[in-house]
């Protein structure tokens, strides 16, 4: 693996650091307060770009246009292909200015993916926080399946445990999973299954590692705060139809349940097999996913 390079960008009281490895957002602070967990420990996909699929593909196998593909299994304990093909790859710096950095990479392994996909991520800080825009373009001569997300761990200044975080998310439905492999089983009503965060409530000791389906008529945002109302606001574009929330339990280790993963996704887990909200990019076609992280 190549050594990563770190790109610092800043504007006003916002400062951010982006790694060329995985195009990962490794730090984001406002007035010296961390808004995300810094990536200083072994990998938890912290801040990385997840493409051309987010989350899990069962057994690492899928079919597209009547052809089967087998992906590398990188989550051995659950026998899944997790979080795409570029989170552990070195991206190229396209441009780097004081308040903005643009990175790019191309996927072109036809044995495991049916085409050539160009990815470009633009990180830019301004008065409204850090805006990230991921653009995917099909550079091949045939259609390709596509989905994307990112994986920041949100930190609430002044709070040391997710148990004290207040979470608000505009979702009436949540995707249940099996207990062993975290693969999707059933889309259910949040109110009937103890996942209703539409009005905002304290997480407490609840375990969450689930995809929430955003209501089309509710704001495209997730708010994570303390009881004082201070915290972090994550907003995202219409193309993020799903939001994965994870309480970062980390097997009960010392860094367990200190931060909250908030992952805007274009599709749910295992979409390469279910086809749910799966994007098909025609040759030459592009797709954009944007999200913003700002202090609240």
Image: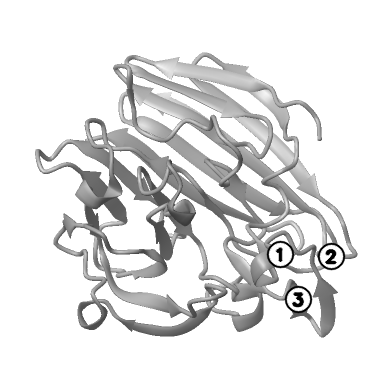
Whichever of callouts 3 and 2 sits on the residue coming sooner in the sequence is: 3
Residue 1 position, x and y percent, is 81, 35
Which quadrant of the view contains residue 155? top left
Q: Which residue is mark 2?
A: 112
Front residue of 134/111: it is: 111
| Distance of label 1 from label 3 (alpha carbons) | 14 Å
Q: Nearer the viewer, residue 59 or 211?
A: 59
Q: CA distance from mark 1 to mark 2?
A: 18 Å
- Which of disc 3 and disc 1 is earlier in sequence? 3
Taking the spot 82% from the left edge, 56% from the top edge, the residue there is 116
Q: Check if mark 3's residue and mark 2's residue have beta carbons within 8 Å.
A: no
The residue positioned 57% from the left and 16% from the top of the image is 97
Q: Position of residue 182 (x, y in %)?
A: 52, 72
Between disc 1 and disc 2, whose residue precedes?
1
Residue that carries the numbered disc 3 in the rendered image = 61
Name the residue: 35% across, 75% down: 174
Instruction: Report the front residue among 204 and 241.
Output: 204
* Residue 280 appears in the figure: no
Residue at 29 percent of width and 48 percent of height? 162
């Amino acid at each position: 693996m190549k050594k990563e390079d770190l790109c610092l960008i800043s504007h006003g009281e916002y400062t951010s650091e982006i790694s060329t490895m995985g195009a990962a957002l490794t730090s984001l602070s406002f007035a010296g307060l961390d808004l995300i967990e810094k990536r200083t420990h072994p990998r938890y996909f912290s801040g990385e770009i997840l493409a051309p699929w987010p989350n899990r593909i069962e057994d690492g196998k899928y079919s597209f246009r009547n052809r089967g593909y087998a992906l590398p299994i990188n989550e051995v304990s659950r026998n899944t292909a997790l979080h795409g093909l570029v989170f552990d790859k070195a991206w190229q710096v396209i441009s780097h200015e004081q308040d903005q950095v643009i990175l790019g990479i191309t996927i072109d392994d036809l044995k495991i993916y049916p085409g050539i996909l160009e990815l470009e991520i633009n990180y830019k800080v301004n008065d409204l926080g850090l805006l990230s825009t991921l653009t995917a373009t099909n550079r091949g001569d045939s259609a390709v399946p596509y989905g994307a997300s990112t994986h920041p761990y949100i930190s609430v200044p002044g709070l040391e445990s997710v148990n004290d975080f207040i979470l608000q998310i505009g979702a009436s439905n949540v995707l249940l999973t099996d207990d062993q492999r975290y693969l999707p089983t059933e889309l259910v009503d949040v109110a009937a299954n103890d996942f209703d965060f539409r009005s905002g409530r304290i997480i407490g000791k609840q375990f969450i590692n689930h995809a929430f389906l955003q209501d089309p008529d509710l704001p495209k945002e997730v708010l994570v705060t303390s009881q004082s109302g201070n915290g972090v606001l994550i907003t995202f574009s219409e193309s993020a139809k799903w939001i994965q929330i994870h309480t970062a339990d980390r097997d009960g280790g010392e860094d367990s349940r200190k931060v909250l993963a908030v992952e805007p996704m274009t599709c749910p887990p295992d979409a390469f097999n279910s086809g749910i909200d799966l994007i098909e990019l025609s040759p030459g076609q592009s797709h954009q996913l944007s999200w913003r992280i700002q202090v609240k």
